[in-house]
């Protein structure tokens, strides 16, 4: 716990220092001492630095730079999860738990949104409050969807699945996690600073003139962006350089491929959202004019820069979910992954193509003439690589021996839901149709089908699948199945009608709508509450099973990737001896085939240096 | 072994030498950073096309560019020096690099005072000018800071032919920042 | 093997038939109020028709596999056949989806864009709309008519209309659901939208005959609506006259909505909210 307290203390001191510095500078230039915008920016910048230094950078890096020995925390037990711990398994769980909590909070915000939308007119919230809730829901959920699978499962599992002891840069790994709590703090801070009503997209000029909360949103996006860039560099380096002997690219588990693709996306594109946020902040606090047309700026620039990241970001949300789904489908269908190479090619194709489709979010934005057409074409072509994942899933199911356990059910739901989400995406990519549907509930339905139906269902598939490995305990299968069916039915009942709402004239981000849509909105809200309630089962199952679930075997699923060769939960250094990979992990149906061997007699633990 | 910490942190079991891993990660980092500058560059042309104001001081721009390029040379010399174990030369050249970097920053600061008169950040060109030079200057500043760290440790006997990664990384970073400037210089001073 | 394949094929055909029947007979879209709406509805229907066989193909395999190949009790540890792929099949799949994707680029895509652009430059009436937090300002330059805080606009039926759209402050978007057309209002530039209304009517006939702001613009966003009245040409002329008199005579800024109320809380909701803190923020 010590680093956390130290971090908080240093953060407060840093914030005070930053603001004091600002006041001094402003006075020196003869300006009034106080101005809220710059004060927030400076306070946060210094506060964040203080936090990072306090939480670990000082002890782990700076002391070494200054020629003094680095400190070491030697906590054990649950306290490790509150420390600057460099063990990738601890970091994975830190990410996972923090982000699931954020998910539940954002989900509760969605419940508030749905409560307001039950009836036309405004009952619970006024329009400004509604916009705050909606924006906070969207932003938090996007952060969750971007960061959870890569942060939690990527960190926890990638090193194990490639037979390594840890990430390439464990300290950096810990640092990327400790960037995330300030993000939570900022989202909370935004609410306290009056909220922000710009949606998760933060379009300017609204974002530059609206309440101060919008700047918290900018800073939060910047911070989580930093975190994912550092994390993705770490993951790419790890996968390239630390694979166990014999683990060739052709034998890499599909989940690792998907994380690699995701990391490549984050590494290449996250800069742009950072830039978009930075430009907004500069416009707001320093009088720059990127987006102010009266002074030579152009608001469309924001959208280009923002979507150049945020479209690839939707693949950051979905690729790891595809990876999890295919991984689980192969192990639970007890058949080799069908068309493995094609699935990998599809994922890499998506990585490459996602760089050239961003303007499909701007078909009605007053885009430069003729620019819509190339983006329509590229967007429609990106269905082709995405479709290869479906081929792999269907081919694997065919003639398999399907064990319909909870993880498998969630994995199958990814395929089902994303089919709907993807195909409706193709509707939106058609310029004429998008003229009507842009910014309506059709889009809302589309992206909940992709992000929630694909990404979040994939996340839950992963949670159930790896729960025994991570905690050493089994979850309750009955409750798991109950959660699945409840969530699956609730999800479809909630979001399917939204397509119809959008087509029939309900636009998004409104607290109030045309009265004739009232009945269906009531239905959607009821279904949403039903959906929300399913998570109580989930939380109950997780908490109870973690505390006193049945002990889990090393390999409860009979799966073959490397993480199942070691005890649950894995020991500190993962592998007693270096694993030798001899074949791909999907050799089902071939008698005697194995993925990897661990040398029988563990040699004395290698000196850890 | 039983404690929860990995001693020096960096993982083992790698099948590549540590230096290779460090280099790979560092190149990825630079690659990723270059996207940030590419974004700024693209925004500059999106907003302002090929136009630029007349008030920019061409001689100052050229001057600081030359200085920065020379500093790349001294940075290179310092890196070669330490990889040959020549500590005094290493320290000397590191110091030169820092000084040249500081002169560059001084030049930028001087340019800024003039720029504030003619095209403040709130003006069309000022926005891109200050954002680009500001972002770049921030990188130069952090480069000087890192060079300072390397210098400080080098004075205290760290690094040698076998252990030249930190100087190497800092120097690579320095080269990177210089290359970025070449593009920025062209985009700000030379176009049209 | 073959038996399974045949069943799936039959399943696919049946599901496709049902799906296509729904796609072709069900009416998903609201009232068609303009030529453009017909174009867009046609594109939508075509996409639906093309999407059905793709979806049913996936779903037929999917559900059949789940029902037919699930491990029975005691079979959990058995393994399926070691089939690792089938390149011919994969190539077929990729080619199939590629052809489909390229096709939809041409057919609803480029074709629809061309049809929407057909009336470009042939407008018979220009209407300027300016978005402001949170209302619309409208003017008819051809008739020397302009009014602020507009609550309605009128269009003559079967007339090519060009909207010149812009904004004073933040982004807004002009959307008429019955016309299916939408264009953002961007400060500092003028965007255009062409529509040719084909049905006489107004908001009281169908609520989709309204201008709805469709780009988040802050607190008043949901209420940035205007009634759209599509009138016979003579009535339109009368409307223009009346409107002119109202604007000049009473000095009234707004115009009454005809025959229905749009949520009345608007003013209360928005008071004191305008532009948030920025004004207090600038020194
Ligand atoms: C996980 C997230 C995710 C994913 C994966 C996708 C995937 C896709 N999205 Fe989506 N999208 C979002 C999240 C996502 N989207 C979000 C959040 C928004 C709204 C942002 C906002 O404004 O707030 C959005 C908005 C959005 C828009 C803008 C709508 C608007 O505002 O007007 C468009 C338009 O083109 C679009 C298209 C697509 C397409 C074509 C795909 C394709 O990748 C889908 C490809 C998949 C398939 C097609 C199905 C499987 C394929 C086959 C079975 C093969 C055969 C099929 C064919 C050849 C057609 N999306
Ligand atoms: C990961 C992404 C994600 C997820 C999971 C969700 C989940 C949900 N979303 Fe959200 N949504 C977005 C991403 C997401 N959304 C985005 C990006 C936007 C756009 C915002 C914008 O326009 O800018 C949006 C917008 C959005 C809107 C449109 C708002 C508007 O335009 O005005 C609506 C409306 O119905 C909605 C509804 C829901 C619902 C009902 C859920 C449900 O699935 C939620 C399920 C409920 C829970 C998860 C809560 C359950 C918790 C409990 C019951 C408590 C139990 C806890 C303990 C016991 C401790 N969402
Ligand atoms: Cu104006 Cu929304
Ligand atoms: Cu997109």
Image: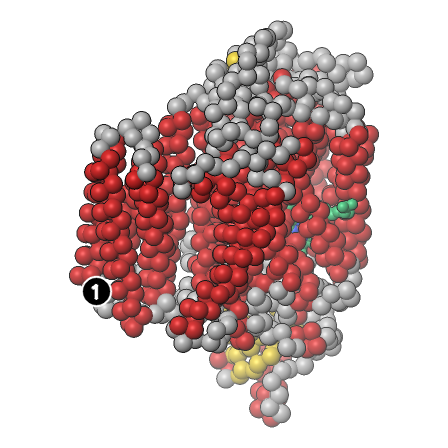
Tell me the element at label 1. Answer: loop
Q: Nearer the viewer, residue A74 or B110?
A: A74
Q: Which residue is mark 1?
A: B57
Residue A283 higher or lower than C89, as above or below: below
Quarter of the image for residue C240 reads bottom right
Image location of residue A551, percent across then percent down: 76, 23
Please tell me which residue is depicted at 56% across the width and 57% down the height of the picture: A12
Please tell me which residue is depicted at 43% across the width and 38% down the height of the picture: A68
Display colour scheme? secondary structure
Quarter of the image for residue C53 reads top right
Image location of residue A379, percent across then percent down: 50, 44
Image location of residue C229, percent across then percent down: 64, 73
Quarter of the image for residue B72 reads top left
Q: Nearer the viewer, residue C231 or A331?
A: A331
Q: Residues within 10 Å of mark 1 (few under 14, many from 20)?
A: some
Left or right, B161 with reference to B59:
right
Number of numbered discs? 1
Please tell me which residue is depicted at 80% across the width and 51% down the height of the picture: A526
Chain of the residue under the numbered disc 1 shown in the image = B
Q: Quadrant of the N terminus of chain C?
A: top right
Residue C145 higher or lower than A337, as above or below: below
Left or right, C50 with reference to A524:
left
């Amino acid at each position: 716990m010590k680093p956390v307290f130290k971090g908080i203390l240093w953060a407060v001191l840093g914030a005070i220092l930053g603001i004091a510095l600002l006041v001094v500078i402003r006075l020196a230039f003869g300006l009034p001492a106080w101005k809220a915008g710059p004060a927030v920016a400076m306070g946060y910048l210094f506060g964040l630095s203080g936090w990072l230094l306090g939480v670990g950078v000082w002890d782990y890096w700076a002391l070494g730079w200054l020629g003094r020995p680095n400190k070491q925390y030697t906590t054990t037990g649950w306290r490790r999860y509150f420390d600057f711990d460099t063990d990738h398994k601890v970091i994975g769980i830190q990410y996972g738990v923090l982000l699931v909590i954020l998910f539940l909070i954002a989900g509760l915000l969605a419940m508030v949104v749905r409560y307001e939308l039950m009836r036309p007119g405004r009952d619970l919230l006024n329009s400004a409050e509604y916009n705050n809730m909606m924006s906070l829901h969207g932003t938090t959920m996007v952060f969750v969807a971007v960061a959870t699978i890569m942060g939690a499962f990527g960190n926890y599992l990638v090193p194990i699945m490639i037979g390594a002891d840890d990430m390439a840069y464990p300290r950096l790994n810990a640092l990327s996690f400790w960037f995330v709590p300030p993000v939570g703090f900022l989202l909370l801070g935004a609410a306290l600073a009056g909220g922000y009503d710009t949606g998760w997209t933060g379009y300017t000029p609204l974002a530059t003139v609206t309440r101060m909360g919008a700047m918290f949103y900018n800073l939060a996006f910047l911070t989580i962006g930093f975190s994912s860039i550092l994390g993705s560099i770490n993951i790419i380096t790890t996968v390239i350089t630390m694979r166990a002997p014999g683990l060739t690219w052709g034998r890499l588990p599909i989940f690792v491929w998907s994380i690699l693709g995701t990391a490549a996306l984050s590494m290449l594109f996250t800069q742009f959202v950072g830039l978009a946020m930075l430009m907004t902040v500069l416009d707001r606090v320093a009088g720059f004019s990127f987006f102010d047309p009266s002074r030579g700026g152009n608001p469309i620039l924001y959208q280009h820069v923002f979507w150049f990241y945020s479209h690839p970001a939707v693949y950051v949300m979905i690729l790891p979910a595809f990876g999890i789904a295919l991984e689980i489908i192969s192990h639970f269908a007890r058949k080799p992954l069908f068309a493995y190479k094609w699935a990998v090619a599809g994922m890499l194709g998506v990585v490459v193509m996602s760089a050239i489709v961003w303007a499909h979010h701007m078909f009605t934005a007053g885009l430069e003439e003729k620019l819509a057409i190339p983006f329509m074409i590229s967007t429609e072509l990106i269905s082709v690589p995405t479709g290869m994942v479906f081929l792999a899933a269907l081919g694997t199911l065919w003639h398999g021996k399907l064990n319909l356990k909870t993880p498998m059910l969630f994995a199958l739901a990814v395929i089902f839901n994303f089919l709907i989400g993807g195909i409706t995406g193709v509707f939106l990519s058609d310029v004429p149709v998008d003229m009507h549907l842009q910014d309506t509930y059709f889009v809302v339905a589309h992206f909940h089908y992709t992000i929630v139906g694909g990404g979040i269902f994939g996340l839950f598939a992963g949670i159930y699948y790896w729960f025994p490995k991570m905690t050493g305990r089994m979850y309750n299968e009955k409750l798991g199945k109950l959660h699945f069916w409840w969530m699956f039915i609730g999800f479809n009942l909630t979001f399917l009608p939204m397509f119809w709402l959008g087509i029939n004239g309900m636009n998004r981000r409104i607290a109030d709508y045309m009265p004739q849509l009232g009945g269906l909105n009531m239905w959607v809200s009821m279904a949403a509450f039903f959906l929300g309630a399913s998570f109580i089962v989930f939380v109950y199952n997780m908490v109870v099973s973690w505390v006193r679930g049945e002990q889990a075997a090393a390999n409860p699923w009979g799966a073959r990737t490397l993480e199942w060769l070691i005890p649950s939960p894995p020991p500190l250094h993962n592998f007693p001896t270096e694993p030798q990979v001899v074949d791909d992990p999907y050799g089902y149906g071939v008698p005697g085939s194995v993925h990897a061997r661990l040398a029988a007699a563990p040699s004395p633990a290698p000196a850890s240096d | 072994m039983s404690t929860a910490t990995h001693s020096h942190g960096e993982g083992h079991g790698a099948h590549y030498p540590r230096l290779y891993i460090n280099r790979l990660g560092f190149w990825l980092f630079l690659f990723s950073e270059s996207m940030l500058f590419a974004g700024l560059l693209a925004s500059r042309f999106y907003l302002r096309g090929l136009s630029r104001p007349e008030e920019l001081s061409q001689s100052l721009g050229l001057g600081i560019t030359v200085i920065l390029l020379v500093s790349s040379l001294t940075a290179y010399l310092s890196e070669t020096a330490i990889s040959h174990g020549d500590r005094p030369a290493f320290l000397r050249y590191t110091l030169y690099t820092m000084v040249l970097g500081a002169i560059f920053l001084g030049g930028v600061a001087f340019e800024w005072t003039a720029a504030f008169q003619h095209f403040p950040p709130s003006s069309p060109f000022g926005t891109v000018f200050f954002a680009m030079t500001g972002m770049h200057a921030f990188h130069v500043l952090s480069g000087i800071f890192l060079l300072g760290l390397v210098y400080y440790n080098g004075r205290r006997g760290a690094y040698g032919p076998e252990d030249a990664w930190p100087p190497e990384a800092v120097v690579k970073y320095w080269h990177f920042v210089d290359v970025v400037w070449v593009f920025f210089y062209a985009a700000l001073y030379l176009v049209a | 093997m073959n038996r399974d394949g045949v069943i799936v094929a039959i399943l696919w055909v049946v599901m496709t038939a049902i799906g296509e029947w729904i796609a072709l007979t069900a009416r998903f879209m609201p009232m068609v109020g303009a030529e453009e709406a017909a174009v867009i509805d046609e594109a939508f229907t075509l996409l639906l028709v093309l999407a059905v066989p793709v979806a049913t193909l996936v779903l037929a395999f999917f559900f059949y596999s789940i029902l037919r190949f699930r491990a029975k009790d005691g079979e959990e540890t058995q393994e399926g056949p070691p089939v690792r792929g089938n390149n011919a099949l994969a190539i077929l799949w990729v080619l199939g989806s590629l052809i489909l994707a390229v096709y939809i680029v041409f057919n609803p895509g480029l074709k629809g864009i061309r049809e929407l652009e057909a009336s470009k430059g042939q407008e018979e009436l220009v209407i300027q709309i300016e978005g402001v937090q949170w209302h619309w300002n409208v003017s008819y330059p051809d008739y020397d008519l302009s009014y602020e805080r507009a609550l309605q606009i009128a269009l003559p039926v079967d007339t090519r209309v060009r909207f010149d759209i812009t904004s004073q402050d933040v982004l807004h978007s002009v959307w008429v659901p019955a016309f299916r057309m939408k264009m953002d209002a961007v400060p500092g530039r003028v965007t255009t939208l062409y529509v040719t209304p084909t049905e006489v009517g107004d908001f009281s006939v169908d609520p989709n005959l309204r201008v709805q702001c469709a780009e988040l613009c802050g607190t008043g966003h949901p209420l940035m609506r205007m009634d759209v009245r599509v009138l016979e040409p003579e009535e339109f002329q009368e409307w223009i006259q009346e409107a002119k008199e109202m604007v000049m005579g009473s000095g009234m800024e707004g115009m009454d909505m005809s025959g229905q109320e749009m949520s009345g809380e608007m003013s209360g909701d928005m008071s004191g909210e305008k532009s948030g803190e920025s004004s207090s923020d600038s020194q």
